[in-house]
Image (cartoon, rainbow, N blue to C red):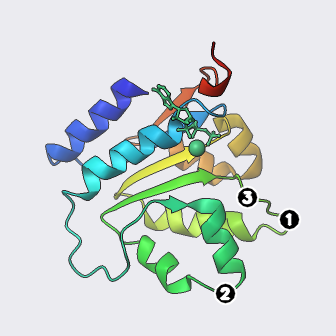
Amino acid sequence: MVNESERFIKDFESGSQPRWISLLGTSGNGKTMCGTHLWRRLSRRANWTGCDFFRETIYWPNLIDELRSTQSFEKYIELKRWPILFVDDIFAERDPNGFAVDKLNCLLGSRIGKWTIITANSTVSEIEKVDRRIASRLVRKPNVCVVNMAMDYAFRE
Ligand SMILES: Nc1ncnc2c1ncn2[C@@H]1O[C@H](COP(=O)(O)OP(=O)(O)OP(=O)(O)O)[C@@H](O)[C@H]1O
Ligand SMILES: [Mg+2]
């Protein structure tokens, strides 16, 4: 996770083709912390001209809650064009009618070719069962997917 994260920062700073990094795996092993670090490094150097909303990390289940109650729609639209986006904890929300997966598909479809950081508490094959297209995009070059199955920090001696 650390090596790939360093490579992501280096690619961004050297002006490489924008891509995604997805940090997947078991709970409590530092995915959000790592994603937040990447977001801080990239967001302060990105060009935010023309973006109205406060730049923040997006906790996906919260955004879905807001969208369900018809809030944050304009923010959701703007996320599609942010120069750098961190969506934390995709697929962590309950999604009985497929609303969240539709919103995610549409968001990620618009993020192709833009710097994007993603975390999920799932494996690629679990994601594939929910939505094949999202799984395919996560692993499709130049995007990189890191699977971290390290033990939860909370349960370490
Ligand atoms: N490298 C590290 N060394 C020590 N503690 C760490 C490290 N990375 C994360 N932690 C601690 O582990 C806890 C869980 O980290 P984090 O929230 O990033 O995990 P996560 O993988 O996103 O978990 P979840 O899948 O449940 O969202 C945090 O309290 C954090 O302080
Ligand atoms: Mg997390």
- Indicate left or right for 3 with 45 as reference: right
Q: What residue occupies the far left of the structure in this picture?
A: 14
Give the residue drawn at x 22%, y 46%: 12
Report the residue marked by disc 1. 96
Give above or below for 130 relative to 106: above
Mark 3 to mark 2: distance in Å?
17 Å
Q: Secondary structure at mark 2?
A: loop
Q: Position of residue 128 (x, y in %)?
A: 70, 44
Report the disc number at residue 93: 3
Q: Amino acid at mark 1?
A: Pro
Q: Amino acid at mark 2?
A: Thr
- Indicate left or right for 83 with 90 as reference: left
Quadrant in the rendering for residue 51: bottom left
Quadrant in the rendering for residue 2: top left
Q: Tag 1: Cα neighbours inside 10 Å, few (<14), some, or many (≥20)? A: few
Report the residue marked by disc 2. 70
